[in-house]
Image (cartoon, rainbow, N blue to C red):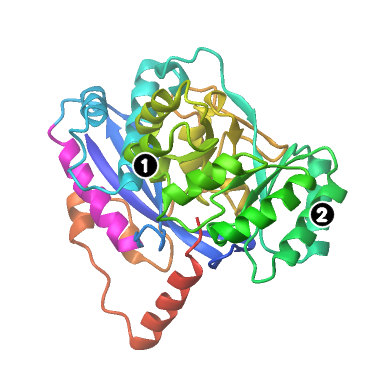
Amino acid sequence: MNVTLRVVRLRLAEPLRISRAVMHERNAVWITVEHGGTRGHGEAVTSVYYGLDTDTLRRLLAGAGTELGRFAGPESALDALRASELPAPGTPPAVTAAVESALLDLVGKRAGQPVHRLLGTARRPVAATARTIGIVSAERARTQARCLAGSGFRVIKIKAGTADPEDDLARVRAVRDAAPTAALLLDPNGAWTPELARRLLPRFAELGVEAVEQPTAPGDPEALARLAARSPLPVVADEDAVGLADVERLAGRVQGVNVKLAKCGGVHAALRIEELVAGSGTGLMLGCLTAGTLGIAPAVHLADRARWVDLDGHLLLAHDPWTGIGGTDGTVRAGSGAGLGVRPVIPRAPAPYDRHAAPGPVAAQAAARPATPPAAQLAAQKERHHREDVE
């Protein structure tokens, strides 16, 4: 199998502010696995929160690509990944998820089957997705919500966690007024103390909020579980539910867990989480990072398994380099073609700012390293990384 990598910058249509940072853009690293003239694709995106910058992703994906060389074909490599024999121990979940995506895409294309059929679902998954409104003024939120409702969105997620909770309440009221029939989700990204959350959640419940993601700071799942036991609306663990062990600790004690493939390690890791929480009273939310259609597509093939679907990362971009899962009308649809069912919409040329992102053998790309940037560029990169710290 031949593996190539490509780096692409993803710019947002407008800045996305959450409680801990503001995002303007992030980089994506595409991995392409080719075997017998057929190609499969996957995507990993940079994240300061998860400690993944562009060079780290490129290095780790290059290493995983080298490991693929010991397999006769993508089918055996995918079996090894399912058995946790690939990639190397300690590989970040986002890298594993991207490699798995490329293998699933390739295996599906070779079999002439869409990914959801490889996973045992005959019918093409279709689901209403939430669309995120960041921390903006109440009037801006009202305008956005009105536009979203007019476009067909039935679920709206509202970011919260400002210094003054009354600002958050005003934003939710404005969205409720503008989209009276939409289901509302709330996401403070861990900005509240347990005491503040206990005071605020009844007020948000009165406004019709149907669930809240990670209201309290991550790192104390016991406090989150105690809050969920007395909350007037469902509590969904996100930052406190990274992988299987975290979910096992919280199953049956919170009303939901947010499963992001880049966080848990991919489709098969998500399926293990689904099996773990089955019958516990804890439902699944399918979430995502801000990414292109390529990065979101694997999760869409699982969309029929979730109570809540929040797969709008590609809808936040100024330009999505891939297409195939929809979403602009409030509904995401698994691609009906073989594999992931997605396709590029722009020539896949290397980004002009990164001459080392050109396609080529993994070994060559792993060896390529940019020259040491000047101090001013380093300062700009540091500032950009700070601004990227958004899930």
The type of residue carrying mark 1 is: Asp
Q: Main secondary structure of the magenta part?
A: helix
What residue lies at 47% left-to-right and 25% top-to-bottom? 280
Residue indicated by mark 1: 246
In the image, is residue 309 above or below residue 374? Answer: above
What residue lies at 62% left-to-right and 25% top-to-bottom? 126
Kindly identify which numbered label has been placed on residue 173.
Answer: 2
Residue 50 placement, left or right of 129: left
Q: Are marks 1 and 2 in contact (CB under 8 Å)?
A: no
Q: Considering only order in the chain, which callout, 2 or 1, is on the residue closer to the N terminus?
A: 2
Q: Position of residue 358 (x, y in %)?
A: 33, 56
What residue lies at 20% left-to-right and 36% top-to-bottom? 86
On whether residue 68 falls in the magenta region, the answer is: yes
Could you say whether the residue bearing mark 1 is in a helix, strand or loop?
helix
Q: Position of residue 117 (x, y in %)?
A: 45, 16
Say which quarter of the image contains residue 189: bottom right
What residue lies at 26% left-to-right and 22% top-to-bottom? 75
Foreground: 366 or 20? 20
Magenta residues, start to end: 54-70
Foreground: 10 or 390? 390
Could you say whether the residue bearing mark 2 is in a helix, strand or loop?
helix
Foreground: 170 or 48? 170
Tell me the crowding category of disc 1: few under 14, some 14 to 19, or many 20 or more residues within 10 angstroms, Cα based: some
Distance Cα–Cα, label 1 vs label 2: 33 Å
Check the picture and name the quadrant holding the N terminus: top left
